Image (spheres, helix red, strand yellow):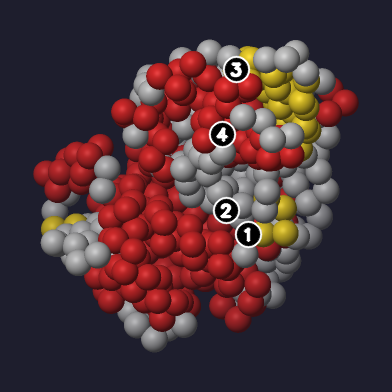
C-alpha cells in the first residue's frame, strides 16, 4: 500500500495527491472499495439513462455534437459517439439531472456523477479494462472526498458546489490514472484543474446544476490531456495568497491538509461511504421526507386531516431547500416544502412527481400552502454516528382536531455506511429509473449486462449498447 508523502504533514498538497494517484498499486485497492465502485456504477448508469432522455440533456447533446468532433466515447442512452470530453460533459449532466445519484457527506456532494463519467469516457477511448476503470474511479473518488475533508464545510457554506468545484480534481485524478501519467504530469494536471474549477449553489434548481457537474467531468479529462502534452501550471497552486483555498475558502495558509496524508491508507468510499438515494430529489430533504412518511403511517394521518405541517432542519440544509413556491420540476427537487407536501399527500415521492404537470396539481398546491419550515434547535443538530454531517429533521403535523403529531429522525433511511441499502433495493431502483427509457425488460437486460461488465466478461462497448432504448419498445 502506498505511503502518502508526509506521514504527519503535507508539504505540497498537489504532490501528495499526485503520488497517491500514480503510486497506488492496483492490488492495493481493497475489495470493499471495488464492490462499492460496482454498486455506484449500477446506481449512476440507471439515473444517467433516465436523465439522458430529458429534453434539456438532448439539447446539451446537440450542443456537444456541434461543438466537438466525432470520437469513440458513447453518449449514454444512445449509439452516438463523440470525444471523451464531450461524452463526459453530456453524461455527467445526465447522471446528475434527476438529483437521484449517490452522494457523500464528507465531500458535500455527489462524487460518482463527476468522476465516473470521466473514467468511463476515457476508458472507452483508451481501451482500458473494467478493473482499470474501477480502480481509476475509486482513486478519483478518494481524492475528491479527501479534499472535502480538508476544505468543507467552509467551502460548502460559502456557496460553492463541491460536486463541481472539488469533484473536478477527482475527475482529473481518474483521468491521469487512466492515461498512465507520471507524478509531475499528474501534479500539473491538478494545477490546471484548479483554474477550471467552477460551480455555485446559487444555480441549484436549474439545469445549470447538472451542467456544471458535466463541465467538471469534461474538464477533468481536458486537464489531464493538457498536462500530458506538456502544458505548464503552478504545481504548488494549493498554497499561497492567490491559491485555490485562498480564493475558494478565503484561507490561504490555514487549511489542515493532513487528510491527504492518509490517502491510500484508508478508503472513504468504504469508511464514510456512498449514500444511495431513495428519493429523486436533493439529499438535504430526505430526512424530512422520511419523517413525514413514517409519521403518516405511525399515526394513520390522512391528507384531508392535515391542517398544518412544520418542518425543522439544520440551517445548512435550508440554505438551498427553503423554496415555498417551486415553479419547475428542478426547483421542486430543491423544495423541502414540496417534497414533504408530496409525501403527506400520497405516501411516496417518486420520479413522476417532478414532471411539469404534477407540480401544479390543485391537491399538492393546497398541501404545499400548509407547509412551513424552520431551523432545528441546536440540541437536535447532532451528527449521528456513522455520518459526518447533520441531516436530522423534525416534522410536526397539526390535524384538523388540533392534535399535534411529531417525529424526529436523525438521518434518512439507509444512509449510514453501516446500514446501506440492500442490493435488491439497488436493483429495484435501477429497473425503475432506467426503465423509464428502456422499458422494464430492457432495464433488466441492462442490469445483467452491467454485472457482466463489472466481472470483466464484456467490454464497455457492450455495456453502452445495452443502455440504448429499442425503438419501438417491445415492452
Q: Are marks 4 and 3 in contact (CB under 8 Å)?
A: no
In primary-sequence order, the first of circles 2 and 4 is 2
Q: Which residue is mark 4?
A: 343
In this view of the protein, which residue sits in the foreground, 1 or 305?
305
What whole-number distance in Å separates the C-alpha atoms at marks 1 and 2? Answer: 7 Å
- Name the image quarter holding the C terminus: bottom left
Q: Residue at x 33, y 47 (%)?
A: 51
Image position of 421 (left or right of 88): right
Q: Nearer the viewer, mark 1 or mark 4?
A: 4
Q: Is residue 342 above or below residue 85?
A: above
Q: Which residue is mark 3?
A: 371
Identify the mark at residue 413; answer none if there is no mark.
Answer: none
What whole-number distance in Å separates the C-alpha atoms at marks 4 and 3? Answer: 12 Å
Q: Are marks 1 and 2 in contact (CB under 8 Å)?
A: yes
In primary-sequence order, the first of circles 1 and 4 is 4
Q: Position of residue 115 (x, y in %)?
A: 46, 55
In the rendered image, the residue lying farthest to the right is: 379
Amino acid at each position: 500500500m502506498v505511503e502518502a508523502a508526509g506521514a504527519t504533514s503535507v508539504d505540497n498538497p498537489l504532490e501528495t495527491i499526485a503520488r497517491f494517484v500514480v503510486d497506488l498499486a492496483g492490488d492495493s485497492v481493497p475489495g470493499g472499495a471495488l464492490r462499492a465502485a460496482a454498486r455506484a456504477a449500477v446506481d449512476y448508469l440507471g439515473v444517467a439513462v433516465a436523465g439522458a432522455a430529458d429534453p434539456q440533456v438532448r439539447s446539451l447533446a446537440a450542443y456537444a455534437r456541434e461543438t466537438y468532433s466525432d470520437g469513440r466515447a458513447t453518449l449514454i442512452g444512445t449509439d452516438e459517439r463523440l470525444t471523451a470530453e464531450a461524452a463526459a460533459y453530456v453524461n455527467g449532466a445526465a447522471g446528475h439531472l434527476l438529483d437521484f445519484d449517490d452522494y457523500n457527506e464528507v465531500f458535500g456532494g455527489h462524487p460518482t456523477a463527476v468522476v465516473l463519467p470521466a473514467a468511463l469516457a476515457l476508458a472507452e477511448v483508451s481501451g482500458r479494462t473494467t478493473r482499470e476503470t474501477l480502480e481509476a474511479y475509486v482513486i478519483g473518488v478518494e481524492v475528491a472526498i479527501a479534499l472535502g475533508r480538508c476544505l468543507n464545510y467552509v467551502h460548502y457554506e460559502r456557496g460553492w458546489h463541491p460536486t463541481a468545484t472539488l469533484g473536478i480534481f477527482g475527475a482529473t485524478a481518474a483521468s491521469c490514472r487512466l492515461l498512465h501519467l507520471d507524478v509531475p504530469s499528474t501534479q500539473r494536471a491538478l494545477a490546471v484543474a484548479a483554474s477550471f474549477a467552477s460551480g455555485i449553489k446559487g444555480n441549484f434548481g436549474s439545469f445549470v446544476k447538472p451542467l456544471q457537474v458535466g463541465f467538471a467531468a469534461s474538464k477533468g479529462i481536458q486537464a489531464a490531456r493538457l498536462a500530458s502534452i506538456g502544458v505548464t501550471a503552478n504545481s504548488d497552486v494549493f498554497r499561497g495568497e492567490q491559491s485555490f483555498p485562498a480564493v475558494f475558502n478565503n484561507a490561504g495558509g490555514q487549511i489542515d491538509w493532513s487528510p491527504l496524508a492518509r490517502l491510500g491508507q484508508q478508503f472513504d468510499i468504504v469508511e464514510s461511504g456512498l449514500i444511495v438515494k431513495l428519493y429523486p430529489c436533493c439529499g438535504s430533504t430526505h430526512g424530512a421526507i422520511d419523517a413525514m412518511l413514517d409519521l403518516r403511517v405511525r399515526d394513520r394521518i390522512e391528507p384531508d386531516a392535515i391542517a398544518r405541517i412544520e418542518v425543522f432542519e439544520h440551517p445548512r440544509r435550508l440554505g438551498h431547500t427553503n423554496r415555498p413556491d417551486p415553479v419547475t420540476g428542478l426547483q421542486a427537487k430543491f423544495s423541502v416544502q414540496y417534497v414533504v407536501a408530496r409525501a403527506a399527500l400520497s405516501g411516496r415521492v417518486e420520479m413522476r412527481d417532478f414532471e411539469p404537470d404534477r407540480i401544479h396539481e390543485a391537491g399538492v398546491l393546497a398541501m404545499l400552502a400548509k407547509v412551513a419550515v424552520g431551523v432545528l434547535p441546536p440540541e437536535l443538530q447532532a451528527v449521528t454516528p456513522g455520518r459526518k454531517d447533520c441531516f436530522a429533521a423534525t416534522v410536526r403535523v397539526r390535524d384538523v382536531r388540533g392534535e399535534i403529531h411529531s417525529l424526529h429522525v436523525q438521518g434518512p433511511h439507509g444512509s449510514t455506511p453501516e446500514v446501506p441499502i440492500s442490493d435488491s433495493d439497488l436493483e429495484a431502483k435501477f429497473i425503475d429509473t432506467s426503465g423509464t427509457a428502456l422499458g422494464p425488460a430492457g432495464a433488466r437486460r441492462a442490469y445483467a449486462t452491467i454485472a457482466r461488465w463489472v466481472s470483466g466478461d464484456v467490454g464497455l462497448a457492450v455495456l453502452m449498447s445495452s443502455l440504448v432504448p429499442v425503438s419501438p419498445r417491445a415492452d
